[in-house]
Image: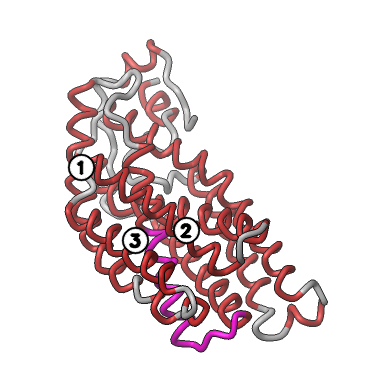
Amino acid sequence: MSGTLSEQALGRVESLQVVVRDETPFLPKVAFTLITLASLGGATFTGLGMGLDWIQIAVKWLTLWSLALAGGFLTWRVCYLRAQETDADQAEVDALNASALSRADLVGRWVAPIVLFGAAGALVVPQLSAQPALRGVLVAGSLLVATSLAIGVSRKHLAISGLVVVASLLLGWAYVDAGANWPAMVRLLHLSAFTLWLGGALWNIAVAMPAGRQHPVVDAVLAGANQLDRFRWVVRFALPTIIATGLVMAWGYHGLPVSWWVTFPGVLIPLKVLAIIALVVVFITCPLFRHCSPVQGVCNLDDLDDQSS
């Protein structure tokens, strides 16, 4: 975990005033931008390899990017946010969660039209022209996810339903891109890891941080730190998965001649790998500089123990 407090230390810090910064830490924003740019580079590479034109590449990228936003966002709602947290006062946890869910409903309604526009990806990809049934399922699935987000992710049953639909859509797109054998599984792992990272980062920036600012008390900090730590564990696996599966997919398209990687579009893969490496650096650096949250203690609970000493 990001740090655990002993009962004695917890008793010392309960009366402390938690420090809250006005500005949102910039490193999470940098990471969100990097993963978006890396995904755009990867989509361009694969799209050109599949014979798509620039408009088709852009629309398909929006489809996968919007599903990733929704999927990772819903994963935080369903899996990381808990109704109860160990060693945290229930009333404070309830208050923090209420603020987070209210904020999540608002952000979800901003994401919904992006997913709605992203539904067009299934309409423009020529590989689906001979599979009208699959095309219809992919379009309908995006519409269902957008509807869930628009109604409100504070309703957990809707969030779970939306997450299940996103997972099914990722499976469908993996099949469209790579067929039904092991390349499709590699593609699905790649899309899933990207989804868990991107949408989770959105929740942290747009929901967890603002909600944490509204509740600068120790018990809310404990709950927020636990949620962030669950996300961190996922990212520890997501980042290397993105790199490994991306390289396998690139090899599957064109093999590994060195000369090919320094010309367009092959150069997009080394650039994408560099962006992911930069993400790893940000992931390591963020807690060191306490840039995971503007609320003291969420990045590392030891900060509360140090203040009470």
- Identify the mark nearer the N-term, 1 or 3: 3
Residue 45 location, quadrant: bottom right
Which segment did they paint magenta?
50-69
- Front-most of residues 147 and 300: 147
Q: What element carries label 3?
A: helix
Please indicate, yes or no, whether residue 277 appears anywhere in the rendered image: no
- In reply to whether residue 61 is colored magenta, the answer given is yes
Q: What's the residue type where badge 1 is placed?
A: Arg
Q: Which of marks 2 and 1 is in front?
A: 2
Visual colour scheme: secondary structure
Q: Are marks 3 and 2 in contact (CB under 8 Å)?
A: no
Q: Determine the residue positioned at 31% across, 65% down.
A: 140
Q: Which mark is residue 183?
A: none
| Foreground residue among 120 and 18 | 120
Which secondary structure dominates the residues rendered in magenta? Answer: helix
Q: Mark 1 — residue? A: 155
Q: Mark 2 points at which residue?
A: 170
Can residue 112 be spotted in the picture? yes
Label 3 and label 2: CA atoms lie apart by 10 Å
Q: Which of marks 2 and 1 is nearer the N terminus?
A: 1
x and y percentages locating residue 234 in the rendered image = 51, 42
Mark toward the viewer: 1 or 3:
3
Q: In this view, does 55 lie to the left or right of 81?
A: right
> In the rendered image, which quarter is residue 174 located in?
bottom right
Is 271 in the magenta?
A: no
Mark 2–mark 1 distance (CA, rounded to whole Å): 23 Å
- Quadrant of image for the C terminus: top left
Q: Name the residue under label 3.
A: 141
Query: Real-space Cα distance between discs 1 and 3?
Result: 19 Å
In the rendered image, the vertical position of residue 98 relative to residue 22, given as above or below: above
Crowding near pointer 3: few (<14 within 10 Å), some, many (20+)? many
